[in-house]
Image (cartoon, rainbow, N blue to C red):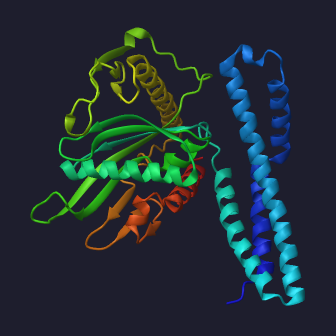
Amino acid sequence: MAVDFALELKDLRSTMESVRQVTDLDSLRTQISELEEQSGAPDLWDDPAKAQVVTSRLSRANSELERIVEMDDRIDELEVLVQLGTEEGDAATMVDAERELNKLKKLIGELEVRTLLNGEYDEREAVITIRSGAGGVDAADFAEMLMRMYLRWADRHGYPTEILDTSYAEEAGLKSATFEVKVPYAFGNLAVEAGTHRLVRISPFDNQGRRQTSFAAVEVIPLIEPTDSVEIPDNEIKVDVFRSSGPGGQSVNTTDSAVRMTHIPTGIVVSMQNEKSQIQNRAAALRVLMSRLLLMRQAEEHAERQAMAGDVKASWGDQMRSYVLNPYQMVKDLRTDYEVNNPSAVFDGDIDGFIEAGIRWKRSAERDEA
């Protein structure tokens, strides 16, 4: 079936117009001008934390503007390519035009989704914690499969990651793991992955080959920034130190460098053991604890607003996705109904479709609540 380039180009321009309206290019350019002025101040680096925030915001704003301008230019270039190919009856040129069209549709779709990431912490880096749930050794193995899935997703996109803590189960897999995805908007993208994940398969750990259902919980929080005001009195924190352990509970460190930090008022516990020194692990644990408290504060404020509106709903993240390997092959998001029939690709990090559908669903739900 021949491609209707006129219709496709019209759709692309319409989508870009929506992106420009949501982004508000005039405000974005004003923001860039103000940040450039701040970054040029001679005393900027007298306060390194503030300087880092300014330069990071400037870089993100410039990248956002450049992406929009680039997409507009590429649509114009595609239109010229189509005109040349049509006028000259050049089939090879039209094949090139169709290939460029498909690339643009994907890139502009991603750009459109990015405009939906306008939450308070969406532009932050992310801290992900995965915990095995019901299902014994299968659940621990599932938790490790999910960790690999997210690390592979990050690797596919060239996003740097850092593993902060891994607690191995006795037989196989993980009790829990915590890692950072160190790229802007990691939280906005991955927040929709938070919740309970469910795996159905023939258990590789069952001698009788029975089907097993197991669960794992995924937590996603925004990384704390120097400008965030989260103060924790020393008397509200309990710190325990212990030796780092590897698979099967074996000791991998001869010193008590691992740190377990407990926030007494909330009962939140953070463990860190992947840094080389106790001081580094303590700093990492405090950073993650502050991030969790920051997100908890936001959730409490949201709950209060919803209570005042008389409409308190259950958390959207619970029981959010099923991975079925037997008796059929399917991965389905229970909130968006987005599904694929290739679990192997999903576990290898191909989850962009789920993330995009989740972001659109979440923003739609928030508009309904407003």
Residue 2: percent from the left, percent from the top? 71, 88
Q: How many labels were placed on the picture?
A: 0
Quadrant of the snapshot with the N terminus: bottom right
Image spot of residue 260 (x, y percent): 32, 23
Q: What residue is rendered at 41% in x and 19% in y?
A: 282
Q: Is residue 24 above or below residue 249?
A: below
Q: Nearer the viewer, residue 294 or 214?
A: 214
Note whether residue 318 is visible.
no
Q: Nearer the viewer, residue 269 or 297?
A: 269
Instruction: Locate residue 60 relative to residue 157 in the image: left or right.
Output: right
Q: Is residue 352 visible?
A: yes
Which residue is rendered at x = 56% and y = 38% of the image? 125
Q: Is residue 152 left or right of residue 101?
A: left
Residue at image location 77% in from the left, 84% down from the top: 92
Point 31% across, 56% down: residue: 198
The correct choice, above or below, for 111 with respect to 147 in the image is: below
x, y percent for residue 26: 86, 44
| Residue in front for this viewpoint, 84 or 238 | 84
In the image, residue 169 above or below residue 49:
below
